[in-house]
Amino acid sequence: MFSSSYKAAVIQMNSRTNLDANLEQAYNFIEEAAEQGAKIVGLPENFSFLGGLSMRMKQADEIAERVPEFLSQTASEFSIYLMGGSYPVPTSDNKLYNHSTLYNPQGKELVSYNKIHLFDVDLGNNESYRESDYVESGALNPTVYEDENIGSWGLTVCYDLRFPELYRKLMEKGSHVLSIPSAFTYTTGKDHWRLLLRARAIENTAYVFAPAQTGTHGSDRRTWGHAMIVDPWGNVIADAGTEPGVAYAEIDHKKIKEVRSQIPSLEHRRL
């Protein structure tokens, strides 16, 4: 178990279809977080571009080229760990991966993850999503990164949150912090977001680190906001509310050890 504690920051954005404007917004929030002493900073899902299918497909090559450079340079400039939310990366099958990455303070990519569970739902009132129309599911390989500075991080994205078996697999691989960058819909977020984040933290006695999108994006999409950090007891220790901004909390590995000794549910599993 790692003994260090450190300040973490979840960024909340209102990304739209202008790549340059989105990267500028992200940079400004990262700079703010670094100045406040955050050791690791996280961006939300689709932080570099949040728009319709045809526009996303059209700009995917440019996004996939520019975003890694942006993340690497920004992590290095501010000497932080940077969780790069997610962004589209073209596949060989004329689809995209919903791709999440983690960079170190030297600007090196440490690990990446392609979203496994795709958001294909009909919410009623003409609100429907078919992520699988343009996104290819990632390999069924739970992704964990560990080092002595930030501990053990498990990478997931948004809709993955609804599949507890994935987080149990991440626990089995040693995760202490669960990364869940999201663009949760307003319709589902108001009822499910906080509840599910707390559940994943409690059942895995782990921190949950959840940057988010907020507000309206174009004429027909609205996201819930409330980027959060949740501790292993299930307490929400950071909440960004509904406006773009940054929320902060301490990741304390002693807290993980304490909660796991109080309620050793991971050791009591029978299945």
Image (spheres, rainbow, N blue to C red):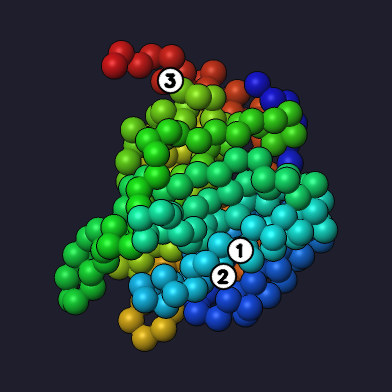
Residue 107: where, in percent of width, then height?
Answer: 75, 50
Name the image quarter holding the N terminus: top right
**Amino acid type, label 3:** Leu
- Which of the numbered marks, if any, corresponds to residue 266? 3
Label 2 and label 1: CA atoms lie apart by 5 Å
- Which of the numbered marks, if any, corresponds to residue 62? 2
Q: Mark 3 or mark 1: name the one nearer the start of the chain.
A: 1
Label 3 and label 1: CA atoms lie apart by 41 Å
**Amino acid type, label 2:** Glu
Asked whether the residues under the numbered discs 3 and 1 touch, taking CB atoms below 8 Å apart as contact, a structural biologist would say: no
**In the foreground, 63 or 31:** 63
Residue 85: where, in percent of width, then height?
Answer: 55, 56
Q: Give the structural element (helix, strand or loop) at label 2.
A: helix
In this figure, which residue is indicated by the disc labeled 1? 65
User: Residue at 53% of width from left, 51% of height from top?
Assistant: 100
Q: Give the structural element (helix, strand or loop) at label 1.
A: helix
Give left or right: position of 107 versus 248: right
Numbered label tally: 3
Q: Residues within 10 Å of mark 3 (few under 14, many from 20)?
A: some
User: Residue at 49% of width from left, 68% of height from top?
Assistant: 60
Asked whether the residues under the numbered discs 2 and 1 touch, taking CB atoms below 8 Å apart as contact, a structural biologist would say: yes
Tell me: residue 214, above or below residue 100.
below
**Amino acid type, label 1:** Glu
Give left or right: position of 144 versus 158: right
Label 2 and label 3: CA atoms lie apart by 43 Å
- Which of the numbered marks, if any, corresponds to residue 163? none
Which of the two marks, 3 or 1, is nearer to us in this view? 1
Name the image quarter holding the C terminus: top left
User: Residue at 69% of width from left, 25% of height from top?
Assistant: 2
Tell me: residue 185, above or below residue 38.
below
The part of the image, by quadrant, that contains residue 65 is bottom right
